[in-house]
Image (cartoon, helix red, strand yellow):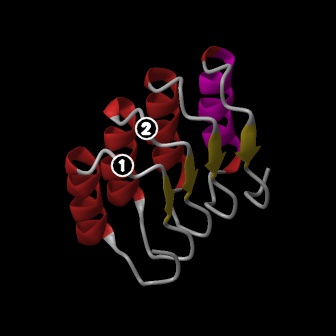
């Protein structure tokens, strides 16, 4: 689903699909127009969706508030091994939220947070 102009409302539909289809193991939502509300939807699904092994969310505009959402999800879903939040404009405060989650989630062995103005 990369580079498809996915916006907030579509992010909601994607989370609904994740709740129904438990066979999805990887999702690429990079290069879309997902903002904070969309990050809330996706990260909410991550809290309970345990089959996912990779999420690529780079090049969206989630900023600090979106980073907080993903931080909360990473604290709940300690099975997710790979996440990419590069180019999401999380800045320093967002990085603090993510760092807090990484103290709890020790299974996240592939993480990409580059180009976020840190």
- In the rendered structure, does residue 94 fall within the stretch colored magenta? yes
Q: In this view, which residue lies farthest toward the bottom? A: 4
Q: Secondary structure at mark 1?
A: loop
Say which of 33 and 4 sits in front.
4
Real-space CA distance between mark 2 and mark 1, rounded to the nearest whole angstrom: 7 Å
- Up the image or down, 16 lies above or below 95; here it is below
Q: In this view, which residue lies farthest toward the front? A: 23
Q: Residues within 10 Å of mark 2 (few under 14, many from 20)?
A: some
Q: Bounds of the magenta span?
A: 92-103
Q: Quadrant of the N terminus?
A: bottom left
- Up the image or down, 98 lies above or below 1; here it is above
Magenta: main secondary structure equals: helix
Tally the numbered discs: 2
Residue 51 is labelled as: 2
Horizontal side of residue 4 vs 19, given as left or right = right
Spot occupied by residue 115 in the image (x, y as percentages of width and height): 78, 61
Spot occupied by residue 6 in the image (x, y as percentages of width and height): 37, 76
Residue at left 23%, top 45%? 19
Horizontal side of residue 46 vs 82, given as left or right = left
Residue 23 is labelled as: 1
- Up the image or down, 114 lies above or below 77; here it is below
Q: Secondary structure at mark 2?
A: loop
- In the rendered structure, does residue 95 fall within the stretch colored magenta? yes
| Residue 9, picture quadrant | bottom left
Residue at left 68%, top 17%? 103
Residue 60 is labelled as: none
Residue at left 37%, top 31%? 47
First in residue order: circle 2 vs circle 1: 1
Residue at left 40%, top 43%? 43
Asked if the residues shown at circle 2 and circle 1 are in contact, with their CB atoms under 8 angstroms apart, the answer is yes
Spot occupied by residue 106 in the image (x, y as percentages of width and height): 68, 19
Q: Residues within 10 Å of mark 1 (few under 14, many from 20)?
A: few
């Amino acid at each position: 689903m990369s580079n498809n102009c996915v916006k907030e409302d579509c992010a909601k539909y994607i989370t609904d699909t994740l709740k129904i289809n438990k066979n999805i193991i990887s999702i690429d939502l990079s290069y879309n127009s997902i903002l904070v509300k969309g990050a809330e939807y996706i990260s909410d699904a991550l809290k309970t969706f345990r089959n996912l092994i990779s999420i690529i969310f780079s090049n969206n505009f989630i900023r600090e508030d979106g980073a907080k959402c993903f931080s909360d999800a990473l604290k709940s879903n300690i099975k997710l091994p790979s996440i990419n939040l590069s180019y999401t404009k999380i800045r320093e405060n967002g990085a603090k939220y993510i760092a807090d989650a990484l103290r709890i989630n020790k299974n996240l062995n592939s993480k990409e947070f580059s180009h976020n103005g840190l």
